[in-house]
Image (tube, rainbow, N blue to C red):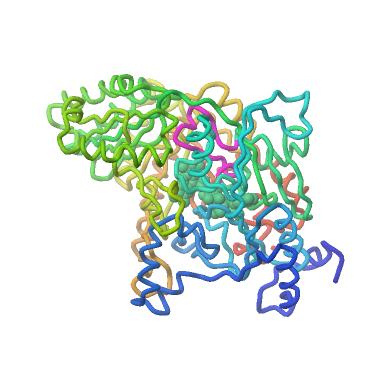
Amino acid sequence: MMPRGLRAAATIGRCRPTDAAWPSQSAWKQLNETVGGNLIPVDFPIADLKTDPSGAAAKALTDNLKNPYFIGERPGLTESFGWADAWATKPSVYAVAARNAGDIAQAVNFGRENNLRLAVKGGGHSYQGTSNAPDSLLIWTRHMKDIEMHTAFIPNGCEGVMKPQPAVTVGAGAIGKWAYQAVTTEAGKYVQGGGCLTVGLAGLVQGGGFGSFSKHYGTGAGGLLEAEVVTADGQIRIANACTNPDLLWALKGGGGGTFGVVSKMTLLVHDLPEYFGSVNLTIKAGSDDSYRRLIRQFVSFYREHLFNDHWGEQAHLTRDNRLRVRMMAHGLDIEQVKKTWQPLLDWVANSGGTCSIEGRTDMVCIPARHFWDSEFWKEHWPEIAFARNGNPLHALVDDVLLHVMRNPAVSFDHRAGANPNDAWWKDNTGEVAIFWWGYESLWLPSSLLKDDAQQHLANALFDASRHFGFALHFNKGLGGSPPEALALAKDTCTNPAVLDAFALVIAADGQQAAYPGISGHEPDLLTARKAADMIHQAMDRLRAVARQDGAYLSESNYFQKNFRQAYWGSNYPRLAEIKKKYDPDGLFIVHNGVGSEGWSRDGFTKL
Ligand SMILES: Cc1cc2nc3c(=O)[nH]c(=O)nc-3n(C[C@H](O)[C@H](O)[C@H](O)COP(=O)(O)OP(=O)(O)OC[C@H]3O[C@@H](n4cnc5c(N)ncnc54)[C@H](O)[C@@H]3O)c2cc1C
C-alpha cells in the first residue's frame, strides 16, 4: 500500500465502484473490523416504490415517509428527496455507522487512502443534498447521540483565559428534540438548536443555525465553544478559542461537510425566561388595494411592537392577499402577548371590513421549560380538547387558550418501539420527503424599517407577493437582538449581513413523496420550473429593495448566484485559507461549499 496521502495527491478523480482501483472486498472487511463491525452496505428504501408499487413494503414506506424519524434512521434516505434540475437523493455504497471519533478517523483514513468520495450525514436535513452522494463512503453519525450538561465549562487549554460557563456537549448525531429534552425539559436551560425539531445540531451549527428564539440568544454557530473534529489527515483535533481557533471559527458558519467531521460539540447554555408563547392568526384582505394597506400597516406595526428580541418566527404573505402570522414570543406572559397584538387587531376591526380575521386567533403562553416537553403536551391535550368543546375556560378567554399548547401543533413518532419523546412540529410535516421546485432566501436590512423607507419596503413586499408567496423569518435576522447575541454572532463566519437584518425572507415550494423514475411519484418538472421562475421574480423584487444578496447558506437556492459572497461576504477569503490548511486535497467537498469551486458538481473530479 502507498503511504498515506500520496494516492489522493496523485489523482484528480475520486474512485467509483466500477473503477479497478475500488477497494477489494478484503479491504472493506478490514475497515469493518477497525470500526467494530459498523460498516454497513447502504440500501435505498425508495426502490420499494419501484419494484412492487402496490406491495405491502411500498404501502408501509409511503406511510413512513411522512415521519422524519423514520427517514433519519435510514442512512440511504434524506429529509429532502431532491430538487428540480439539481439533485435527487441517492445512497452511498457503504456507510460507517460511527460510534465515536475513532470510527470516524478510520473512515476518513480509508476514504483518503483509497481516493473515495466521502459524504457525511447527521440529521440528513440538507436542502442542497450535501449529505448524500452516490458511489461514496458515508460517515453516518446518527448513533452518536450522547448529551452531557456542564455547569461550568472551560474549553480545553483555555484555563485562565476563559471564564467557566454553563454548556452542553452533544454527540454529532444529536437532533434538536433530543437536545431540548436534555437541556430545557430536564435541566431548565436553553441551547440554540433549530426551530425544526429533527434538524441535526452538527449540520445546523456549522451552517449558522437559527431557532425560534435566536433573536434573543443569537445563532447556534455563535454558541459553539468547542468541537472535536476529525480532519482530512485523520487526526482527531480539538477546536476552541485556544487550540486551533481558526478551525473553530470556520466551523461557526462555514458549512458542514467541509473542514472535517465533527464528532462532538460543546455549546453555550443560557437561562430560560418564564414563558415562551405563540401567536397564530390570519388576516385576509378583500382586494389588492386593501392588501397593500394591510402590508403597509404590518410593516409599521412590526417596527413599533415586534422589532426586538421578544419576537421570532414567521409572517407569510400570500398571493391571495392573506397575511398569516405564525410567531413565537420569548419572555412575555399572555397579557403582554395580547397587549402587543391588540393594535393590529384594532386596526383590522376598524378597517371597514376591507380586512378581516380568518378562522381562529390563538395566543398561547406556556412555561418555557415545557415548551419542548412531550409529557407536558400529552398531559394537557385532553384539557385543550375539552376547552375547545365549550369548556367555560374557553368561553372566558374568548378564543384564546391560556398556558396550554395547541392540540394540533405536534406529531409523535407512533411506530412500535419508538422513543416516546420523539415528536415534530406539524408545521414541518410539509417538508418531509419533499422534492423542491425552488427555494431562495435573502436577508432584509433593518434600514428598511426606518420611517422614510417603510413605504418602499411595503411596496416591494406587495409586488413580490404578486409573483409568489413568501415568509419573513424574523428570528433569522439579528437586527433588534441584544448586544450579547450580536457579539457571539459577530465572531462567526456567517455573512455579516445577518447582524443587521430584521428578517430572512424565504420563498419556496415543492412536491412531497416525489422521486424521478418512479411511476406515480414523478416530479412535475414543468410546474417546478414555473414555480422556480416565479420564486426568482418575487425574490428579485426584494433583492432590489435590500440592495444586497446575502442569503442563509443552510436555507438557500441550490443555484445561488455568487454563493461565496451571499453566504460569507467578506469572510470568504479567510475561510478559503483555512480550508487549504486543513483539507488541502479537497477530501471534503459539498455543493457550493468552501473550496467546492475547484471540483465538479458531483464532487468526483478536480477541475
Ligand atoms: C425541514 C427543515 C427544517 C429546517 N429548519 C431550520 C431551522 O429552523 N433553522 C435553521 O437554521 N435551519 C433549518 N434547516 C436547515 C438546517 O439547519 C440545515 O439543513 C442543516 O445543515 C441540517 O443539518 P443536519 O445534520 O440535519 O443535515 P445533514 O444533511 O446531515 O448535514 C448538513 C450538512 O452538514 C454536514 N454535516 C452533518 N454532520 C456533520 C458532522 N458531524 N461533521 C461535519 N459535517 C457534518 C453534512 O455533510 C451536510 O453538508 C431546516 C432544514 C429542513 C429540511
- In the image, taking residue 78 as reference, residue 230 lies left or right, namely right
- In which quadrant will I find the N terminus? bottom right
Segment colored magenta: 204-221
Q: Residue furthest left?
A: 352
Image coordinates for residue 211, horizontal then vertical, percent: 48, 37
Q: Examine the rendered structure and indicate whether residue 303 appears above or below residue 221.
A: above
Res. 32 image quadrant: bottom right
Image coordinates for residue 603, horizontal then vertical, percent: 64, 62
For the point 73% across and 80% down, the residue is 20
Image coordinates for residue 438, horizontal then vertical, percent: 42, 54
For the point 76% across and 45% down, the residue is 237
Residue 217 magenta-highlighted: yes
Image coordinates for residue 157, horizontal then vertical, percent: 79, 33
Q: Is any atom of residue 60 visible in this view?
A: yes
Q: Examine the rendered structure and indicate whether residue 176 appears above or below residue 9.
A: above
Q: Examine the rendered structure and indicate whether residue 575 appears above or below residue 415.
A: above
From the viewer's side, name the closer residue of 434 and 102: 102
